[in-house]
Image (cartoon, rainbow, N blue to C red):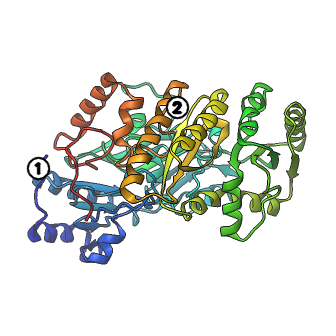
Amino acid sequence: MRYGTLTEDLAAQLRAIVGSDHVLDDQESRARYGHDETESLSFPPDLVIRPRTTDEISRIMKLASAHRIPVTPRGGGTGLSGGALAVYGGIGLSFERMNSILEIDRANLQAVVEPGVITQTLHEKVEALGLFYPPDPASRGSSHIGGNLAECAGGPRASKYGVTGDYVLGLQAVIADGSTIRTGARVLKNVAGYDLTSLIVGSEGTLALVTEITLRLIPLPRHRRVILVAFKTLEEASAVVAGIFQQGITPSALEFMERAAVSIAEERLGKKFPNGEAGAQLFLEVDGNSPESLDHDIAGIAALLEHHTPLDILVAQEHQKMEDVWALRRGIGEAVKSIAPYKEEDTVVPRSRLPELVRGVKEICRRYNITSICYGHAGDGNVHVNLLNEHLEEQQWQKTADRAVREIFALTVALGGTISGEHGIGYSQKSYLPIGIGPGELGLMREIKKLFDPLGILNPGKIFPDEEPPPLPR
């Protein structure tokens, strides 16, 4: 694959579009925009551009298309699959200045936002009005709505409320040749033609650059409570999950974590987790519009747990106690990553198969002498498997970890699951995609990519396993 050269003349034309202050080419800026939260990978773009409007992005893409310059879109840089890495150089296009909430429509329960809006900012704005935007990734304090859309992010509340794609009603986007399109509509029913909105959501910036998003909101639940249940082992904790839903109870969050994950979070945050010495814990949240409905759910959960011999059950009702427990849960990911070089996998299986997945992951890692720490969204079967390199040389680590990951993914697929629940495929996971996707499906995906982006300039080097290898990291 051959790309054009980003010349001084072309850089001058780009500066004329967005202003010189918003085109960065110094080494420090390029390095800052050259990594995300994926391991230690770094691919600096040749130029960073920070547009403010859809028209500016359209003009940028027309120039990039005319000169065949690769363009890598970037949100908050919190991705975990290398989706925002400019593996072929070229233009790094940051949405950080497109950060306005354009409208909150209380009558129709909708919001219109730009892609650079920080997820937590949207949460706080709509909740102040008694509304709720449920998608809730761990990085909500820094991730952008546009990045959440690119990965179809989920988070702890997905088991009850769904993922980002379930709340996207329509989009404005710029495709590779600079054309602007609109998809969807501000209605709840729409079967007028193909569902292009759903196609773009989760496409990891490889099909279009989203510049405006219309989101569905729901009323904010008035009450919630948090339940912590301690178990002797991780397998015992995971075995309870399916039974909770079979009781007709749908928690707003159902998380699980093993002792090592809890201990690391306690140390990093300087706070104690209740029953932190237990082998594993389930963290449940129930919500609703009446205390009586929550009491009913908690009683049902407690009755089920009597048959599974938990070590302890704690119920938190005070706001600050619930927030403290949530802070510890949200801090686990960063805490685990601070231990050693790591690989984080994002496996997901039907929740009834969760015990088999956890058991298999631990066995595979024992055979390869790799430390593993598991936590994640038990309510939807999504296990974050962290493999830590505590003693191997780099070359041996890469080879050993790759073999272990392939076995973990093969097990996941055999259990009816898939290799990524919410982190995407991006750059770091693309070689594994054929484990979970057949050649027929991959062929269709390639043809769709060609229709949207015939020159292959939009976020190249992502998702597809057999693209031309990118250059070595610079």
Q: CA distance from mark 2 to mark 1?
A: 36 Å
Q: Is residue 108 above or below residue 413?
A: below
Q: Secondary structure at mark 1?
A: loop
Q: Residue at x 38, y 28 (%)?
A: 437
What number is the disc on residue 371?
none
In this figure, which residue is indicated by the disc labeled 2?
412
Q: In the rendered structure, which amino acid carries the disc numbered 1?
A: Arg
In this figure, which residue is indicated by the disc labeled 1?
2
Q: Who is closer to the viewer here, 155 or 306?
A: 306
Q: Who is closer to the viewer here, 49 or 42?
A: 42
Give the percent coordinates (x, y) of residue 335: 60, 62
Count of labels in the image: 2
Look at the image and tell me whether residue 150 can be seen.
Answer: no
Q: In the rendered structure, which amino acid carries the disc numbered 2?
A: Thr
Q: Who is closer to the viewer here, 96 or 76?
A: 76
Q: Quadrant of residue 353?
A: top right
Q: Earlier in the sequence, mark 2 or mark 1?
A: 1
- Farthest residue toward the top? 440
Q: Residue at x 52, y 62 (%)?
A: 340
